[in-house]
Image (cartoon, rainbow, N blue to C red):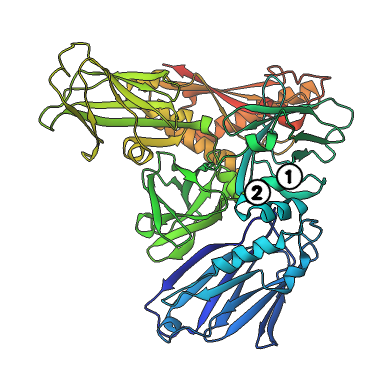
Amino acid sequence: MFKVCRIINLFFLAPFILNSQSLTFDGNNTLDGQPLLNTTITVMESGKQIKTFNTGNQSTFKLDLPFGKNYSIYFINAKSQRMYMDVIMNNLPEKAQKINMTYAFDIPFFPKDAATFDTAQFKNPFHKVIFDGKNKMVDDTIYMKQFIAKVYLRNENVKAAVAADPKTIKWNNLAGKFSYNNKEKLPVRNKKVNLINGNGAVVKTTSTNKYGNFIFTGVNLNDARKIEIDFKKEFTNQTVSVELTNSKGEVICTNNVTNNKAECQSSATNKVIEKLIDPRFSYKISAKLIQENDKKISFYAKRTVLLLNDKNTVIRRGKTNPFGSFVFTDLKPGQTYLIGVEKIDVETGMKVNLYTNADHYIAPVDSAITSRFVRRFSADNNSVFNDLLIDESQLRMDVSGKLYGDNMNNPLGDLKILLLNDKFETIDTTTTDGFGRFIFKYIPFSKDYTITGLDDKESLLEAISNILVYNSEDEVVKIVSNFKGKRFKYNPLDAEKSKLTEIYADDPWLALLSTDTKTIRKANTIIIEDILFESGKYNLLPDARRTLEKIALVLSLTATIKIELSAHTDSNGDDASNQLLSEQRAKAAVDFMIGKGVDPARVIAKGYGETRITNRCKNGVFCTDDEHQPNRRIEFKILRN
C-alpha cells in the first residue's frame, strides 16, 4: 500500500503585506519516502499550458500561482505514474487574496510498476487543494480518501475486504529493527527494506536508519505478507544471520542471508506482520547547535531551542546543554517539523549551524520566519532526519520536584524517594531536603517511571491526606491521595512527566562538568569519540576539531582530571603501518588541544594500531564494515589528579 497524500506545511508568512496576488506553492517530490529527482512539472489553466519546467537534480520546487483562478499541476517522471492535482482558487474573497500565502506539500508519487494500482484512476486528479471559506488553502481530505480507496481496489484482497465490510481496511504503522544475529547485535544500517504482498510484489519500500530501525506507515494488513531486507552485493560466500525485532524489543524472526537478501514471512504460527504493528510509534531526535563565522566557533550553550509544527507553531521548548546539544521526543512519522532559535539569542555576526552530537555537519539554521531562524525537516526516511535520530539507550534524564503534605506550608523533608522503571525495578534513590526537594540526576531514560516514598520515621506521612507534587519552578503538577499503611506511589502521566523531567543526550563529558558528587562518580573512566580521519591520513577534519574543542572546554572548566588519548585502527591493512598511523593520529589530536590552551601536562598521546581489537575481527577473519567500525576509534582515558 502507498502512503496517503498529506499537507506538510501551510502558513501565512506576512498578513500585513497587502500587495501580494499569488500563492507560493512549495513542493517536495518523493517516491517511497526518498527524494525523487528529474521530474517534469506542467501547470495548466483553462486548458492552456502556462508554465513547464524540470526539477533536474533536485526534488524540491517552487511555483507562484496567481489568485482567482483554477490550476491543474501535472507531474511526469519515468519512475512514477503520470498524475496531476487541482488547485482551486477562483472563489477566494478579495481580503484573502491580499495575504502572502505559502502552501508546502510533500508530493508522494505512485510507483510505475505497482501491480496493486488501478491505473485508470490517474485520469482523475490524485489530490485537490481548496479554499476553506475563511482565510487559507487546505487539503480536500474527503476527495483524497476517496481517491486512495479507488486506486487500490485493483488488489483482490482489498476488493474482498471492501465487499465484506468497508470498515475492515485499517491503515497501520509497522515498526521494527534489523540487527546482525551475533554476540554484538550490531544494527543493520542503511539497507533497503521491502514490504511484500501475497503475490510476491513489492508494495512499499523504505530503509533502515543508523540504528537498524525502519517504519512503514499506512499499511493495509490484507496487502502485507513478508518483510525483506536487501544487502545488494555485500555478501558472497559468507554465512550471515540477521534478526528482526519489533519496537518492544521482542525477537520475532531470525534468518540467514541468501542471495544477499533475508526475509521474515508471516505464517499461522508466527504472525510477523501483526507483531510489528505499533500505532504509538514515535521518533526521538537530538543534535547540536554551534555558532560560527570565519573567525570564531562557539557552542550555542544553555539557550532556548524550539520545535515547531508544519503550521509554524511552537509545540515544544527545550534548553541546550553546555555543548549546544538538545533533545526532542515523540515526533510522529511522516510529519514535518522545524527546529528554531530566537534571533535575539544569536550573537551578532554569527550564524547557527546544526550538527550531530558526534560533531558531523547537518545543515544551517538560517530560514528566517518572523523573529526566528528555523530549519525544516521531515520525520521520514531521508539523510537529514537520519542524522537527527537518537536511540533510547543514548538518552539520559533528570527527574526533579518538590513534595508537600496537604499544603505548601508543610514540605516533606528527609523522606526517602525511589524512582522505579516500567518493570518496577529501582533506577535510583535519593532523600528530600528540608524544603521537600528531590532530584535524580544523570539516570537512564525511561519513558514510564514511578516515584515512591519510604517513610523511615513512620510518622512523617501518618497525618497527611494528600501529597502535593510540584515541579522545580513551583508549579503544581499533581495532588496524590495518601493512604495510611500504604506506600506513597505516583505514576506521572505524559503531560506531567514533561514538567518533572529534563531529557538529554548521553554525552559522557557532561558528568565531569557536574557539581554533584554522585553524578561525577557515575562518569565513565574511558570515553570513546567518533573522530574520523581520511583513509591512511592523520590530518584533523573539521568534525574532529569540533569534538576536540568540546574536550578542551571540559579541561578548562575542571582542574581535577587529565586525559590519556589513544588511537586505534581495525585489522585491515599492514600491522606496522596501522601502528604508525594510530600514533600520528593521537599526536595530531593532542597537539590541537594544546593549541587551544590545554596544559601539555594534562594530555598524553598513545597509538595502539590494531593491537586492541574489541571483537572477533582480527587478521584473517572476514567481518562486515559495520563489525570493523567499533575498532576504528579514539579513546579518552580519564585520569584523576
Q: Is residue 257 left or right of residue 166?
A: right
Q: Is residue 174 above or below residue 15?
A: above
How many numbered marks, from 0 up? 2
Q: Quadrant of residue 359?
A: top right
Residue placed most toward the observer, 603 or 467 = 467
Q: Is residue 113 left or right of residue 554?
A: right
Q: Is residue 113 visible?
A: yes
In this figure, which residue is indicated by the disc labeled 2? 219
| Residues tagged 2 and 1 counted as in contact (Cβ below 8 A) | yes
Q: Residue at x 88, y 32 (%)?
A: 236
Image quarter where the C terminus lies is top left
In this figure, which residue is indicated by the disc labeled 1? 195
> Which is more foreground, mark 2 or mark 1?
2
Q: Residue at x 77, y 21 (%)?
A: 576
Q: Quadrant of residue 46?
A: bottom right
Q: Pointer 1: residues within 10 angstroms few (<14), some, or many (20+)? A: many
Q: Quadrant of residue 531?
A: top right
Q: Position of residue 568 (x, y in %)?
A: 67, 24
Q: Is residue 627 above or below residue 139?
A: above
